[in-house]
């Protein structure tokens, strides 16, 4: 029996739903496809095929890898290396810190646990960008500007990641920890050898959150990573776009490089990430 | 993020270890907890509480130079800001921006979510495609759309192809903010859709079976069954969207610098500008405090809405 909330109940309606959904999907994908095609074109060729409009807009007639070659040697190449290093360090150290906090807040029993949890959650409820400007002043006073440490620190503790991990830890049967205690395992051993290995989906979801935050960060590196040796990818990309003579081919190639890494990770880990999002949005 | 758990499964899981722990509470757990929490708490104090305290303190001072100096000035900064026509314009532009972008994105996300819970050929691919822009960093989306909005760019080419007049887009005070909204919606709508899809899938099937027995049609079911049961995820998405929208900075900084004629001067860009371009740290910090008050108010409303339901 078809339920009254379903749209695709007859072949004709299924067809309509399919067409609508695919139009939306193509609409979201087109700008990326245009970017990908443009990255293999020469700068002047990007504005070809527009008047009159032609389907060739999305398929370069002559492929060139010059744009990528230009980027690798310049400031942009270094910025991508910086971004990869900073983001990798953020995800690894950040996951450890967030998982430790989540473990204490879900498994360990101590007086004031509810208060600490509320404090952690409420503090991280204030979005980072809102206090980024005063924090940048502090970091300059502490001489942390233009250092990797200064770029990495703000991405390490993430209330969302702590929350996702805590939810997951609470659903692991506590008997496992109890049995391990009886066998003489310390809390660190329980955390490291029982909880972390059992929590791969939550760790991937939380790690992806940390990754997206740091990889896409713009305001913070704009204020803290101003030295040419510490520039991150998004800033270098904006610098390309702000030059006097804009090289559109290079911009598209740079934009594609910066999208490629999250895109690949997203396609691999989409399920874990969407599940961790869903667990906060609806169960919250 | 909404973080107070009301999920019965979680609540049960919370009680189980609690019972076990009351049987044998030991001082060792307190020490272990302190060690496990230490890094996060240090970061919390250094990265959230200290800058907030500094912003509040310096909003009541004048003449602060790179964190020192400054004399107590009472509400001088606040008076200066609120009587300044430029800042009044910033508040106005930010309000208009929020009033357009939040309902627009939620409506699009709801439409897509309703569509994407249906079964049709390629639904998995469509969901992935809609979600993909989320992965692109804001700077990437900004730069790409910036090229697309060029006077001789592809959007004007499409307009020309269907016989419409070409538009100035980012160089027009009437269109720039709308262009920014379109760009941001391209990034954001897929993300919010995910939450709503999860919410739709959580609605018990029995409710729809009951609606079918009552002979309810599709619209009637949407209005009386789907939307009321989607209240929580919808409330979450509205609040989270408002919070992220009020913090928009990247496209303004890269594409318009608040212009033309102040038409895209959102508060994040303005406070960045006050602090680092104009070099008036105290005014910048005052704007941070105003922003924080707004964010805390929104979050408080969210908590009230959610706690009322229990």
Image (cartoon, helix red, strand yellow):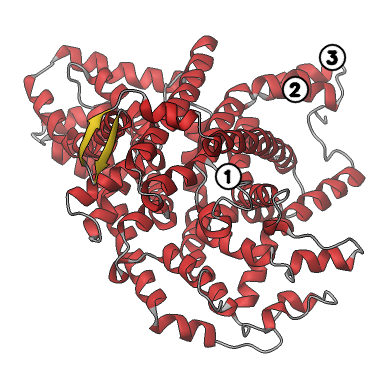
Mark 3 sits on what residue? B214
Res. A95 visible in picture: no
Q: Observer-nearest residue: A240 or B302? A: A240
Q: Observer-nearest residue: B161 or B175? A: B175
Which of the two labelled residues, at mark 3 and mark 1, occupies the earlier sequence position?
1
* CB under 8 Å between discs 3 and 1: no
Mark 1 sits on what residue? B191
In the image, which is nearer the foreground, mark 3 or mark 1? 1
Q: Chain of mark 1?
A: B
Q: Could you say whether the residue bearing mark 3 is in a helix, strand or loop?
A: loop
Position of residue A246 in the picture relative to residue B295 (left or right): right
Q: Residues within 10 Å of mark 1 (few under 14, many from 20)?
A: many
Position of residue A60 in the picture relative to residue A230 (left or right): right
Q: Observer-nearest residue: B256 or B10? A: B256
Q: Is residue B137 above or below residue B191?
A: below
Mark 2 sits on what residue? B208
Quarter-of-image position of residue A40: bottom right
């Amino acid at each position: 029996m078809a339920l009254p909330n379903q749209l695709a109940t007859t072949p004709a309606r299924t067809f309509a739903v399919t067409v609508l959904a695919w139009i939306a999907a193509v609409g979201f994908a087109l700008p990326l496809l245009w970017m990908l095609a443009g990255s293999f074109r020469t700068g002047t060729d990007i504005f070809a095929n527009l008047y009159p409009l032609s389907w060739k807009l999305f398929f370069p007639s002559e492929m060139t890898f010059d744009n990528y070659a230009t980027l690798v040697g310049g400031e942009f190449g270094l910025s991508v290396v910086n971004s990869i290093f900073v983001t990798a360090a953020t995800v690894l150290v950040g996951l450890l810190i967030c998982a430790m906090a989540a473990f204490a807040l879900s498994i360990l029993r101590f007086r004031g646990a509810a208060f600490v949890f509320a404090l952690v959650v409420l503090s991280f409820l204030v979005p980072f960008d809102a206090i980024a400007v005063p924090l940048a002043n502090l970091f300059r006073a502490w001489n942390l500007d233009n250092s990797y440490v200064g770029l990495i620190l703000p991405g390490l503790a993430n209330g969302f990641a702590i929350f996702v991990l805590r939810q997951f830890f609470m659903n692991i049967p506590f008997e496992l920890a109890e049995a391990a205690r009886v066998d003489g395992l310390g809390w660190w051993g329980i955390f490291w050898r029982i909880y972390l290995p059992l929590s791969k989906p939550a760790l991937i979801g939380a790690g992806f959150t940390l990754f997206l935050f740091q990889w896409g960060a713009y305001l913070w590196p704009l204020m803290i990573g101003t030295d040419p040796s510490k520039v991150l990818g998004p800033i270098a990309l904006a610098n390309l776009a702000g030059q006097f003579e804009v090289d559109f081919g290079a911009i598209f190639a740079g934009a594609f490089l910066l999208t490629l890494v999250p895109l690949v990770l997203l396609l691999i880990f989409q399920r874990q990430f969407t599940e961790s999002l869903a667990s906060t949005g609806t169960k919250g | 993020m909404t973080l107070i758990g009301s999920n019965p499964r979680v609540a049960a899981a919370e009680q189980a270890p609690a019972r076990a722990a009351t049987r044998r509470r030991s001082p060792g757990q307190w020490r272990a907890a302190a060690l496990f929490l230490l890094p996060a708490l240090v970061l919390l104090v250094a990265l959230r509480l200290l800058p907030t305290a500094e912003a509040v303190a310096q909003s009541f001072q004048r003449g602060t130079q790179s964190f020192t100096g400054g004399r107590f000035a009472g509400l001088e900064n606040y008076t200066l800001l609120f009587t300044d026509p430029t800042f009044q314009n910033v508040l106005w532009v930010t309000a208009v921006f929020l009033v357009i972008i939040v309902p627009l994105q939620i409506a699009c996300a709801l439409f897509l979510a309703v569509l994407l819970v249906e079964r049709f050929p390629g639904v998995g691919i469509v969901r992935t495609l809609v979600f993909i822009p989320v992965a692109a960093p804001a700077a990437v989306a900004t730069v790409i759309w910036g090229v697309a909005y060029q006077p001789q760019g592809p959007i004007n080419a499409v307009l020309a192809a269907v016989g419409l007049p070409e538009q100035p887009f980012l160089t027009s005070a009437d269109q720039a903010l709308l262009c920014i909204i379109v760009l941001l919606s391209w990034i954001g709508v897929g993300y919010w859709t995910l939450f709503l899809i999860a919410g739709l899938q959580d609605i018990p099937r029995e409710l729809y079976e009951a609606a079918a027995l009552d002979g309810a049609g599709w619209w009637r079911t949407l209005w009386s069954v789907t939307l009321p049961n989607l209240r929580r995820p919808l409330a979450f998405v509205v609040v989270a969207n408002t919070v992220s929208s009020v913090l928009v900075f990247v496209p303004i900084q890269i594409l318009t610098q608040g212009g033309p004629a102040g038409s895209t001067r959102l508060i994040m860009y303005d406070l960045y500008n006050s602090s680092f371009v104009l070099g008036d740290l105290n005014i910048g910090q005052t704007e941070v405090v105003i922003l924080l008050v707004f964010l805390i108010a929104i979050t408080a409303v969210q908590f009230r809405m959610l706690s009322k339901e229990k």
